[in-house]
Image: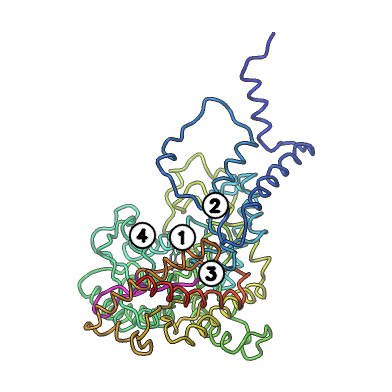
Amino acid sequence: MKAPVFRKHLTEIRNAFPQPVSDPQHDSYFVFSILRALDRVDSMKSEVPILGKLQPLNYSTAEDAHVADEMSTLEIVSRNLVDELHGMPIWGHPRTQINVVPPTTIPSIIGSLLPAIYNPNLVSDDTAHAFELAEAKVVAMTAELIGYDRKLATGVFTFGGTGTTLYGVKIGIEKALPDAMVNGVGSNAVLISSKQSHYCRLNVAGWLGIGEKNVIAVPTSLRNEMHLESLESAAKQAIESGKRIVAIIATMGTTDAFGIDDLGAIVALRDQLVEDYDLDYVPHVHADAVIGWAWSVFRDYDFEENDLGFRPRTVRALAGATNYISKLHLADSVGIDFHKTGFAPYISSLFLVKDAADVNRLVRGREQMPYLFQTGERHPGVFTLETSRGAGGVLSAMANLQLFGKVGLRSLLGHLVEMAELLREHLDGHTNTTVLNHENFGTVTLFRVYPDGVDTWKIKDRERTDESAKDELLAHNEYNRRIFHHLHDQALQGKGVRISMTDCYRHTEYGEPIVALKSYMLSPFIEEEHVELLVSSVLKAREAISHDD
Ligand SMILES: *Cc1c(COP(=O)(O)O)cnc(C)c1O
């Protein structure tokens, strides 16, 4: 009897899976397939900081895509997949200084790959087995790193930095409005964070039912940190008008400027409010440290001894940031992105809670999930928002924590801060460029470029404070946009460095946005020559633009 047709297809399909039982010949086919894909990608690299050719994104062709009748092959599909990489920025390229997107280490890539093959689901140790243990280990390692008591703390990986803030605020809701999980939030909730905090505060407020309009955005000082007196008066006003503060978000490293809130003072203020108003709940303090957490590796670095040999300016910058970051353990919960300053692939975000008992507030009745959790011990699924959770983020984070240790991360961050400081030195040395976030000590530098004849010593403050300078501010905003576009075009031709621009690094005192050019250094391959290249291409862009006029 002839075998039915589908059996032929089934054979091909089986070939496209890793073999369940050791088959060395097929294993090498698997490995070789990955190797060939990577080989093809390698041929897309050049001096230009993108892969392959930059083609315009043609969505109308994309919208014509459909599922074919016939099967394809691993070889063809793999080639097609590699084609999708055309135009992708190479984050690790020393001529890429775009945003807070890191290049990823090889161990962290392997950390993503292994779970992709064996497919654990972190909902429970029934489905994840030792991967659940890996999550517990990374939680313990990171908790200790930031100064939490790891016996008391717990945590889970979630769907991004936004997810970590969502978890923190959700716990805060349950503290301020007990049983909101059952009854809903009502209209009394307010959420407080700084004007410079990440916009995800609005997503979180909207999605959790607090409402965007109930987010209080506290002004920041010129250091881009929450202004404490404004925080105090905002909090008092909220309490006195009968509102309940579901959470105060402290931003430990703002996205554009690397401003860091004074967490110690915020927690002290919170405690004082609880006492003064005899509150029947304790407003939750969540630290959005998705960027800043990594500086925790310097908590026990002896800056006086400076064994690693950083330059004095770098030591000052590292110590300045560490001074703030070392307060992280005071927060009730903390958000950490390994896919930012941890050099892991997306998504690798960890939500940590100081007191594990806090997550009990999120547990739903076990009877609602009868088919899960029949065996095993660790069941984050009883309180996580997610049901399925992949383990790629966990293993990538673990890979990098092991690879770097404290010394590796200190050396890498230290180098990047050193390069950022060097850039600032150069920008300060020219009459037509000025650094905006001098008081923030990260690897990000915000700066503005001015046409001839502008006094860059005075203009910065005048534009920010004096409404009569509004026209100049707006003209210079436009000027910086043009500089940016010029730099961008040049970078894509392999000349100069690709940087970013922010439309509003902060507002002027009269409410206008201040545009800034932004160099975000995360590539370990950046050297002094690339810093000089950036500065010289900025100066060339000035000339090119004045010729256009
Ligand atoms: C990037 C960022 C977020 C959002 O994190 P995702 O991982 O992109 O979801 C939140 N807060 C700050 C300060 C950030 O920089």
Separation of residues labelled 3 and 2 (CA atoms):
18 Å
Location of mark 1 (residue): 359
Q: Residues within 10 Å of mark 4 (few under 14, many from 20)?
A: many
User: At 35% across and 86% down in the image, what residue appears?
Assistant: 453
Q: Is 514 colored magenta in this rendering?
A: yes
Q: Residue furthest left?
A: 241
Nearer to us of marks 1 and 3 is 3
- Which sits earlier in the primary sequence, circle 1 or circle 3? 1
Q: Amino acid at mark 1?
A: Val
Q: Residues within 10 Å of mark 1 (few under 14, many from 20)?
A: many
Q: Disc 1 vs disc 3: Cβ atoms closer than 8 Å?
A: no
Q: Disc 4 vs disc 2: Cβ atoms closer than 8 Å?
A: no
Separation of residues labelled 4 and 3 (CA atoms):
39 Å
Location of mark 3 (residue): 496
Q: Amino acid at mark 4?
A: Val
| Left or right: residue 234 compared with residue 326 | left
Q: Which region of the structure is painted magenta?
A: 504-520
For residue 416, above or below residue 385: below
- Which sits earlier in the primary sequence, circle 3 or circle 2? 2
